[in-house]
């Protein structure tokens, strides 16, 4: 079975997953303040958990509001140490790749599709970069509630959360209306949750925004299978990677219910043809400039780090511009 089919479906862990499933079943509490937040799904805090385990400072900071420890205990892994390390590296690579691209290209406006509880918006607002996160209402309300805990008044003016279904034309145009100048639209583990019809609507909306504002659409969603499997294999080898993947499959199968039939392309060519049909130019760029700067690799040996650095030079990040 193709990697795209197996792993894209399993490891896309965002609030968007929860929203699509309608699986808002757990109350999450702020560990430090005791404040109660909106009901969210079991999957909601896990991205923050993995980023925190990677050592990403802002994720450690935000994990005070959303904890995943009890959730992960529900489906014990046979090899928990490697499962944690592999997922931490995988999540940090996704997260860092988009942040690195945004800053390296000098973008001052960000539109983050399916932003979930990613700390990206807080980081960008602290740097004076205009950030608009797009999410469905239940998630957007929770984000609006906790963001002021991490930004001062001057920084808050750079942060906006828009309640919108990004397949809805009017809602997407409203989300982007106050963006002035070229915008970097990003998608992190979102496209694989959309049916072909939903992807079609999203690409049409993104194209219209980019034609008006200028800029690009950046994602690694269509290469995430290789990103997890090949990246993990560089560190642990093929046999161990299969075991790690099986454990991770069991974890997400136990905490989430999502039907991925008809959402994932069988090959990169099919995805590229779909993108071209929506009047986009596509450029493939290296995932990371230097993977050795990731927080999560500090516990690896020199051989593993060098392999990961070489792997990150593969063209796993897709950059689209409107024709």
Image (tube, rainbow, N blue to C red):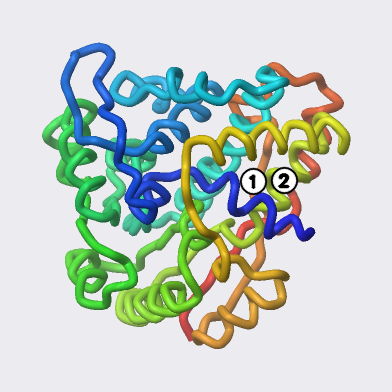
Of residues 243 and 146, the one drawn nearer to the viewer in this rendering = 243
The image position of residue 171, as x and y in percent, is: 21, 70
Mark 2–mark 1 contact, CB under 8 Å? yes
Count of numbered circles in the view? 2
Q: Secondary structure at mark 1?
A: loop
Residue drawn at x 60%, y 74% as measured from the top left: 282
Instruction: Say which quadrant the N terminus sits in.
Output: bottom right
What residue sits right under mark 2 in the picture? 312
The tag on residue 242 is none
> Can you say whether 196 is above or below 29 in the image?
below
Residue 2 found in image quarter: bottom right
The image position of residue 73, as x and y in percent, is: 51, 19
> Can you say whether 22 is above or below 54 in the image?
below
Q: Pointer 2: residues within 10 angstroms few (<14), some, or many (20+)? A: many
Residue 64 found in image quarter: top left
Of residues 148 and 102, the one drawn nearer to the viewer in this rendering = 148
The image position of residue 166, as x and y in percent, is: 32, 67
Badge 2 or badge 1: first in the primary sequence: 1
What residue sits right under mark 1 in the picture? 288
> Can you say whether 268 is above or below 47 in the image?
below
Residue drawn at x 50%, y 52% as measured from the top left: 189
Residue drawn at x 22%, y 64% as measured from the top left: 175
Residue drawn at x 50%, y 29% as measured from the top left: 51
């Amino acid at each position: 079975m193709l990697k795209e089919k197996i792993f894209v479906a399993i490891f896309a862990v965002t609030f968007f997953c929860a929203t699509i499933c309608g699986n808002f079943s757990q109350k999450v509490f702020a560990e430090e303040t005791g404040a109660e937040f909106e009901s969210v799904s079991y999957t909601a805090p896990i991205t923050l958990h993995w980023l925190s385990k990677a050592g990403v400072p802002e994720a450690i900071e935000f994990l005070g509001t959303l904890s995943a420890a009890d959730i992960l205990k529900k489906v014990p892994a046979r090899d928990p140490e490697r499962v944690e390390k592999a997922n931490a590296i995988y999540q940090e690579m996704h997260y860092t790749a988009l942040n690195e691209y945004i800053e390296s290209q000098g973008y001052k406006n960000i539109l983050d599709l399916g932003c979930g509880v990613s700390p990206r918006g807080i980081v960008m607002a602290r740097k004076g970069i205009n950030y608009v996160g797009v999410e469905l209402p239940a998630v957007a309300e929770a984000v609006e509630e906790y963001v002021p805990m991490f930004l001062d008044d001057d920084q808050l003016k750079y942060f906006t959360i828009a309640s919108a279904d990004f397949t809805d034309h009017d809602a997407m145009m409203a989300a982007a209306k106050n963006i002035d100048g070229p915008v970097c639209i990003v998608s992190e583990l979102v496209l694989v949750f959309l049916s072909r019809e939903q992807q079609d609507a999203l690409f049409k909306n993104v194209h219209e925004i980019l034609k008006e504002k200028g800029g690009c659409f950046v994602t690694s969603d269509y290469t995430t299978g290789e990103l997890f499997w090949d990246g993990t294999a560089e560190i642990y080898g093929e046999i161990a990677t299969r075991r790690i993947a099986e454990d991770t499959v069991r974890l997400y199968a136990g905490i989430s219910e999502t039907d991925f039939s008809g959402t994932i392309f069988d090959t990169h060519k099919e995805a590229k043809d779909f993108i071209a049909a929506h009047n986009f130019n596509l450029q493939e760029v290296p995932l990371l400039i230097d993977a050795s700067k990731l927080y999560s690799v500090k516990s690896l040996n020199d051989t593993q780090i060098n392999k990961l650095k070489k792997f990150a030079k593969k063209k796993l990040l897709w950059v689209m511009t409107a024709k």
